[in-house]
Amino acid sequence: MAREFLKVECGECGNEQKIFSHPSTDVKCLVCNEVIAKSTGGKAELHGNIIQELEVE
Ligand SMILES: [Zn+2]
């Protein structure tokens, strides 16, 4: 199964961060500490814009 990563721009400060598309815990922005990807048990609920989708096999 392919593992997906997303490059997301933080909705608060604009920092670009690479995150797992299905995180098991909430992912916070490394710059402003805002939660940019909320863990849902499936695909993350994003607070920000997807810059790029990266697929890793
Ligand atoms: Zn931020």
Image (tube, rainbow, N blue to C red):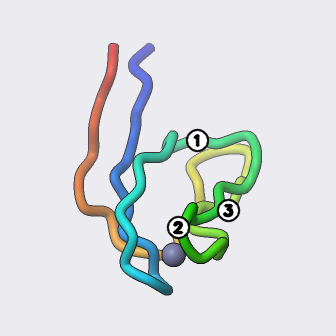
Task: Give residue 49's quadrant in the image.
Answer: bottom left
> Is 29 on the left-hand or right-hand side of 7?
right
**Few, some or many C-alpha atoms within 10 Å of disc 1 (few <14, some 14-19, many ≥20)?**
many
Q: How much space separates mark 3 and mark 2, taking CA atoms?
A: 6 Å
Label 2: state its secondary structure: strand
**Amino acid carrying mark 1 in the image:** His
Q: Earlier in the sequence, mark 3 or mark 2?
A: 3
Q: Furthest residue to the front?
A: 31
Sequence-wise first label, 1 or 3: 1
- Spatial separation of the CA atoms under disc 1 and disc 3: 9 Å
- Residue appearing at x 39%, y 70% in the figure: 15
In this rendering, position of residue 19 left or right of residue 44? left
Q: Picture quarter containing residue 22?
A: top right
Residue 51 percent location from the top left of the image:
25, 61
Query: Is 35 or 1 nearer to us in this picture?
Result: 35
Which numbered disc flags the more N-terminal residue, 2 or 1?
1
Name the one closer to the observer, 39 or 9.
Answer: 9
**30 to the left or right of 13:** right
Residue assigned mark 3: 38
Q: Which mark is residue 46?
A: 2
Are the residues flagged by discs 1 and 3 in contact, CB closer than 8 Å?
no
Q: What quarter of the picture does the C terminus occupy? A: top left
Residue 22's mark? 1
